[in-house]
Image (cartoon, helix red, strand yellow):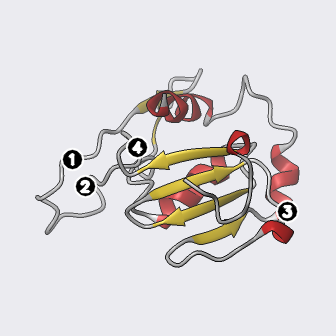
């Protein structure tokens, strides 16, 4: 799959519509009507050291929801931008060069705000609240 940003394969994490977290599913917490055609989204539960339970309902449908694709980029510290094509893919980019930017019909490219990038450069991977969710994301792609 060619990148519309010209970024190398090594700097791209592709979540396709065929992957576990990229495929289309329905979340009964979000959609109550008209979603019977799709299987129910699998939700993972994450527990903190204090026992608090977290569920990220937007950690699915990544190739079908731009908001969910942006959410994943927001929680992945090395992600600086996304390429999104509804029904096809959500690509997380770890580098971004606007000089290599080209346009492809149906693909949206969004950059993470610089202030978010700066704050995530100092993330402690051990205490990071989204660490287990990120591990699940990468495990679903292998």
* In this rendering, position of residue 81 left or right of residue 22: right
Q: Which residue is mark 1?
A: 40
Q: Residue at x 43, y 63 (%)?
A: 65
Sequence-wise, the earlier of marks 4 and 1 is 4
Quadrant of residue 33 within the rendered picture: bottom left
Q: Are marks 3 and 1 in contact (CB under 8 Å)?
A: no
Q: Earlier in the sequence, mark 2 or mark 1?
A: 2
Tell me the mark number nearer the camera, choosing from 4 and 1.
4
Disc 4 vs disc 2: Cβ atoms closer than 8 Å? no
Q: Would residue 2 appear left or right of 10 to someone viewing this image?
A: left
Q: Is residue 107 left or right of residue 86?
A: right
Identify residue for label 2. Answer: 26
Foreground disc of the pair 4, 3? 4
> CA separation, marks 4 and 1?
12 Å
* Residue 42 on image: x %, y %: 30, 39
- Relative to 46, say whether 97 is above or below: below
């Amino acid at each position: 799959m060619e990148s519309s940003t010209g970024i190398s394969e090594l700097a791209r994490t592709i979540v396709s519509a065929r992957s576990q977290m990229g495929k289309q599913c329905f979340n009964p917490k979000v959609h109550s009507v008209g979603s019977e055609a799709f299987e129910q989204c699998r939700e993972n539960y994450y527990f903190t050291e204090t026992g608090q339970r977290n569920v990220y309902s937007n950690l699915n449908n990544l190739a079908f929801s731009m908001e969910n694709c942006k959410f994943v980029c927001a929680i992945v510290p090395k992600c600086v931008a996304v390429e999104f094509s509804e029904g096809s893919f959500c690509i997380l980019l770890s580098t971004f060069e606007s000089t290599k930017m080209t346009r492809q019909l149906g693909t949206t490219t969004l950059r993470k705000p610089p202030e978010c990038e700066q704050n995530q450069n100092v993330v402690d991977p051990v205490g990071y609240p989204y660490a287990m969710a990120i591990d699940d994301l990468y495990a679903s792609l292998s």
